[in-house]
Amino acid sequence: MATAAYRDIAIHLGVDAGSELPAQLGYAAALAAGCEAHLCGLFNRPCLPMIRHYIPPEVIERHKAECERAAVKARQLFDAAAQAEGIATEWYDMPGSALETVLVQARASDLLLLSGVVPGDKTARDYDRETLADEVVLALGRPILLLPGAPKPGLPKTILIGWNGSREAARAVHDAMPLLQRATQVTILCVDPEGQRGLPGAELARHLSRQDVAAELLVHAGRDRDAGSILLQTAQDRKADLLVMGAYGHGRIRETVLGGATAYMLGKMELPVLFSH
Amino acid sequence: MSYRDIVVHLTLDPRNAARIQLAIGMARRFGARVSGLYTVPPPNVPYYMGEYIPTELIQKQMDEAQTASVSAHTEFMATCASAGIEHRWLSSELAPVEALRLTVRASDIAIVGQPDPNPADPASVPYGTDVLPHELALQAGRPVLAVPHSGSVTEIGRRILVAWNGKREATRALHDAMPLLRSAESVHLVTVGPERKGRTLLAEITEHMQRHGLRLETAIVDPAGQKVGMALMAEAQARQADMVVMGAFGHSRLREMVFGGVTETILSSMSLPVLLSN
């Protein structure tokens, strides 16, 4: 029986939304419907950087118009996705930096969805999105769900937990509880270098069973630095539709946590990742 | 989310009984198991003994520690059994923070003691417990409930004061306390002014909590020249709160100077159980 619940799910929308936005909004709406949660759209209109204290008026006008177009389009897509799922929504349209607006609003929610990078899409704006995810996950105090590409909608059925006994992993597991309790298959993956730590993850499996989550434990012999690729390989083998893991305080989440080579793979798999710090 | 696994810290100190009682009360309410984790204090050799340490002294201390551990074990097992609570005993020779953090990460909440704010003899403070609540809250990734060093604590969580400043740590504390908040009669979200960003979020948080089935009373308190921590404790008393929920701030220099002081003030002056989260 599920005792944990998300009641407020937020999704951040920027002016740089890509072609995958409708799919991501569809995912968000389906998730909110599955959890019986409210969906909150956080749209932000970035400020223009000042160039020697002067910005030509036509540049300001163009920027404003661009923001307005993006806002209208995002709102339309958001409303359409919400209507399709019949969920209650809220819409915030805020000026200022994405980080600040997201932090202020999403602390009053249970989960924040952010769009990640699509493989092969190497525009400068992707860098901003990725940086935003890194900064947000450290400063928010709520879990984030990173959506690479266009994930298939619906509550995740097969969830893979990357467990290393860290504080961040503990956060991620407990923050993911509403999803874990609604999943049909949960696997805890521990990468254990030399089998020194007894049976890592056994305590967690027992704990999860008290939270009504029947989890299977998988201990993989391997080095810590290969943990990312082992995790993704396992996710692929098991056809996981959600990865749950801790986000650590150093560097870009996908590159340092999962390893540079695996970032591409993650994007290609269109596998959402719940990160917590 | 509910608390199903509660870890209670036990060591060589007179407050084990109070913590066990609190753990049992919560276990009963949430249908949880209680894990008693006993940390064995290492031999404590006074510095003035110099390099010569008589083996008898160490032996005597180890014997005492052994006796204390046996009696703590007996007390814990008997109390939990007679309360009809599922329980288990764990023991570790690591320092309390190191021993607890691993177990707590695979649990829902930890119950530890407030360090004695005015120890008559600093050497009598149980090993490693002086930094326990704050340090553990920073390292566990789970909420830590600190039990006051003196006074009796019977039932908690009827009237809860949540210290709110709109920051990450406060956000964590609020959400980590959810099982307690849901079973409370009243929840008071208190911001000690002068508030800026904290205030703009009060309405959103209230609405967010409403969706979780909770009604909040919110208040903005003028510290009137007092330390923020003292103002919070006074407000808790004025509202007849029986516990406080707050963020544990730490480590980054600037944040430590600004907010860490609040955590420390509360931890040294608390007369109510305090739930800390980071």
Image (spheres, rainbow, N blue to C red):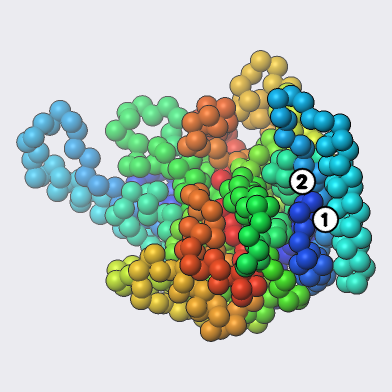
Q: Is residue B252 visible?
A: yes
Q: Which residue is mark 2?
A: A105
Q: Which residue is mark 1?
A: A40
Whole-percent x, y for residue A192 in the image: 36, 71
**Protein chain holding label 1:** A
Front one among B82 and A111: A111
Q: Where on the picture, by quarter, is residue A221? A: bottom left
Which residue is depicted at the point 86% across and 57% down?
A74
Counting labels gives 2
Front one among A200 and B239: A200
Whole-percent x, y for residue B5 in the image: 54, 63
Q: Amino acid at mark 1?
A: Cys
Which residue is depicted at the point 79% across and 51% down?
A15
Under tag 2, what secondary structure?
helix
Front one among A171 and B86: A171
Q: Where on the picture, by quarter, is residue A271? A: bottom right
